[in-house]
Amino acid sequence: KTLGFYLMIPKILRPKVNIPHFRRCALAQRRKMNTRSTLHTAPQTSKGIEAPQAGQQIVIVGGGIVGAATAHYLSELGEAGNTTIIERCRVACAASGKAGGFLALDWSDGTRLRGLARTSYRLHQELADRFGADKLGYRPVHTLAVTGTETPSSKAKAGPGQELIPSWLDGNVTTAASLGGPDTTAQVNPYSLTTTLVEHAQQQGAKLIEGTVTGLDLDDAKKVKGVHVNGQTVPAAIVVLCMGPWTDIAARDWGLQLPRVQGLKAHSLIYSPTLPKDAPGPPEHCLFTSFGYKSGKEAEPEIYPRPDGTVYVCGEGGDPEFLDDDPEKVTVEDDRCANLARAAVSLSSMLEGSSVTARQACNLPVGPDAVPVIGAVPGVQGIYVATGHSCWGILNGPATGKALAEQIVYGRSKSVDMKPFSPARFF
């Protein structure tokens, strides 16, 4: 009962925990291998990495949630005027604009991500208070695990947890159980969040450049001096690489010492259903399902009604593919989307006949140990990286950005212990 891209995770890294398999791709470190390599420590001292001097430029490569959050928190620390974001297509054009936006306070407890996830969950609440929950599509939710089938069954509505099943989930649902409530689970619209953070940074003085970074300008001491963009050099004393799985390509092309980060494809649909006239509003549930098709295939689609009335459905992986230079050219596999649609309409008549406003796919960045790679890049000066967040990128984006901003300005993170994520752990 696993997703296509979950099966691509090495078996030794797959955990056995009571959360949906789709989310296990990000929590593989739950049952981490017992062997441990001797690793270099992060290149930090009590004074930390050298902070940028007044007026020195900071360049963020990548306009997804991590780049947006880094720019936002740099602006909060007074560095907006020195900050430039470079994005090759448009802000949130890849996974950060196509993600579901599910947030969980404690699903990373017991792993190296605990502090990052809990801090970031709180930051999401703070951002919603600051910019407006409606603007960000943020709200606490009830989260359910449900089982269902494509074929009507006599077991429908006969299993345990019937009292938890909301009225709009009126299809072939067998059982239900609670995975979390409004105190521990929430949702946000990833596109709205990412674009809002970039817009705020721009209002504070940050610059946004549309272009492709083709290389780094390093001096003889391997200290960064700038980045090459569209045939020109943009000066920089600090460079932050947060390009999702494309960070891996850049690392290889530019000779940086970083671990391999691969892209795992994920498909999604967005429905625009018509709610019943007597409905109090959009359903406030996020669903993690175990679904059986007529063919005998089993999958685990996720269904997230959103505050704006749309419904986001995801959970189909996809075939590995070469990463195109353009993140917007990810191939959408029709059969994967068809499977999602069949599951969705089998579980809720609200979605049957509803228009599908988006059929999309994106690549989730996953590192060798399924733990994010965040921090100073070994062997060079002034270059940071943040990638490998897999399907928890939206949840952990704000804390990642804040920690990076603190490392850049103060020489160390004050909000999160970043040692577990250091790129140096691989070398």
Image (cartoon, rainbow, N blue to C red):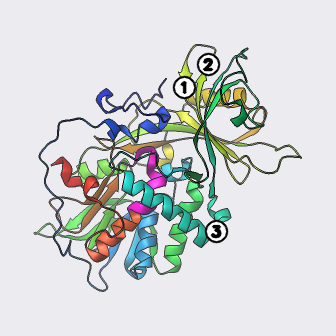
Confirm or deny contact between disc 2 and disc 1 (CB under 8 A): yes
For label 2, the residue is: 293
> Where residue 132 is drawn, which disc sits there?
3
Specify the quadrant of the image occupied by residue 288: top right
The range drawn in magenta is: 388-400
Residue 33 placement (x, y as % from top left) = 24, 35
Query: What residue sits 69% from the left and 48% below the top?
Result: 284
Give the secondary structure at mark 2. loop
Give the secondary structure at mark 1. strand
Visible residue check, residue 64: no
Q: Identify the mark nearer the N-term, 3 or 1.
A: 3
Query: In the figure, is residue 418 to the left or right of 322?
Result: left
Q: Reply above or below: 284 against 299.
A: below
Q: Identify the mark nearer the N-term, 3 or 2.
A: 3
Residue 194 placement (x, y as % from top left) = 53, 61
C-alpha span from label 3 to label 1: 35 Å
Query: In the figure, is residue 413 to the left or right of 266?
Result: left
